[in-house]
Image (cartoon, rainbow, N blue to C red):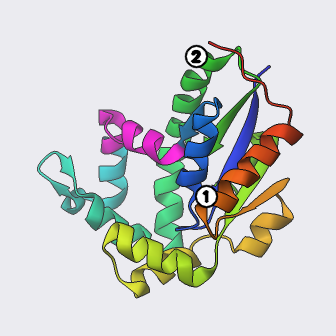
């Protein structure tokens, strides 16, 4: 049976970069954020979002993600409400994706809120990616063209590194890309991952 490696880390830690390294080395990677974007194009999910948050976050039939983000990233209850709609759909999307990789020993499930959503319980191995807080803030400001305050408010909605690390099997310190890549190689050796071709 294919084992699932949960890959997580706080906003700006560089999880996606690390996920890309695993993919380069032959481990299939599922990005939960991309899964969420896919499921949020389905009419059923959009209808649920509309009834939960109101029609004013839509421009016609199109969901205005910025308006929705403003609501949920400043209020834990609203975020929990959105997650209750999106997470079960992402779980189904992941299960359908996993079917294609049944003959692999391991796959990666990359998610920012792996612990907060409870999905970590379904992983066989967990890797947390860390980076110094200032580095993370700068990365996100640059990437999302956002403000420091907005980044900090999103950080507050997530577990801190200490809490994540306490529940993880491996930690990758993503201070620099070379170090992160070396850590990935080490983990592959420890897990003895020799990928079969699908």
Numbered label attached to residue 113: 1
Regarding residue 118, the answer to whether it shows in the image is no
**For discs 1 and 2, the disc positioned in front in the rendered view:** 2
Q: Nearer the viewer, residue 74 or 103?
A: 103
Left or right: 138 in relation to 167: left
Q: Please give the range of residues in magenta.
A: 32-46
Q: Nearer the viewer, residue 132 or 149?
A: 132
Q: CA distance from mark 1 to mark 2?
A: 24 Å
Label 2 Cα neighbours within 10 Å, binned few <14 / some 14-19 / many ≥20:
few
Numbered label attached to residue 72: none
State the image coordinates of residue 30 (x, y, percent, origin top left).
56, 37
Left or right: 39 in relation to 188: left
Up-down relation of residue 75 to residue 110 (above or below): below
Q: Quadrant of the N terminus?
A: top right
State the image coordinates of residue 65 (x, y, percent, origin top left).
29, 58
Which residue is painted at 40% across and 80% down in the image?
A: 150
Asked which secondary structure carries label 2, the reply is helix
- Residue 98: in magenta span: no
Residue on which disc 2 sits: 100
State the image coordinates of residue 40 (x, y, percent, origin top left).
36, 42
């Amino acid at each position: 049976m294919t084992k699932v490696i949960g890959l997580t880390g706080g906003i700006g830690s560089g999880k996606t970069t690390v996920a890309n390294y695993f993919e380069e080395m032959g481990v299939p990677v599922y990005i939960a954020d991309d899964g969420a974007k896919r499921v949020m194009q389905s009419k059923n999910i959009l209808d649920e979002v509309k009834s939960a948050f109101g029609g004013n976050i839509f421009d016609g039939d199109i969901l205005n993600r910025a308006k929705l983000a403003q609501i949920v990233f400043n209020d834990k209850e609203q975020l929990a409400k959105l997650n209750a709609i999106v997470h079960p759909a992402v779980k189904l999307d992941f299960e359908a994706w996993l079917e294609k990789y049944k003959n692999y020993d391991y796959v990666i499930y990359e998610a920012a809120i792996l612990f907060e959503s409870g999905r970590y319980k379904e992983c066989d191995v967990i890797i947390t990616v860390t980076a110094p807080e200032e580095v993370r803030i700068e990365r996100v400001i640059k990437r999302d063209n956002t403000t420091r305050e907005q980044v900090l408010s999103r950080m507050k909605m997530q577990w801190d590194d200490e809490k994540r690390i306490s529940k993880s099997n491996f930690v990758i310190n993503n201070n620099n890309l070379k170090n992160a890549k070396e850590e990935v190689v080490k983990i592959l050796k420890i897990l003895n991952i020799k990928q079969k071709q699908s």
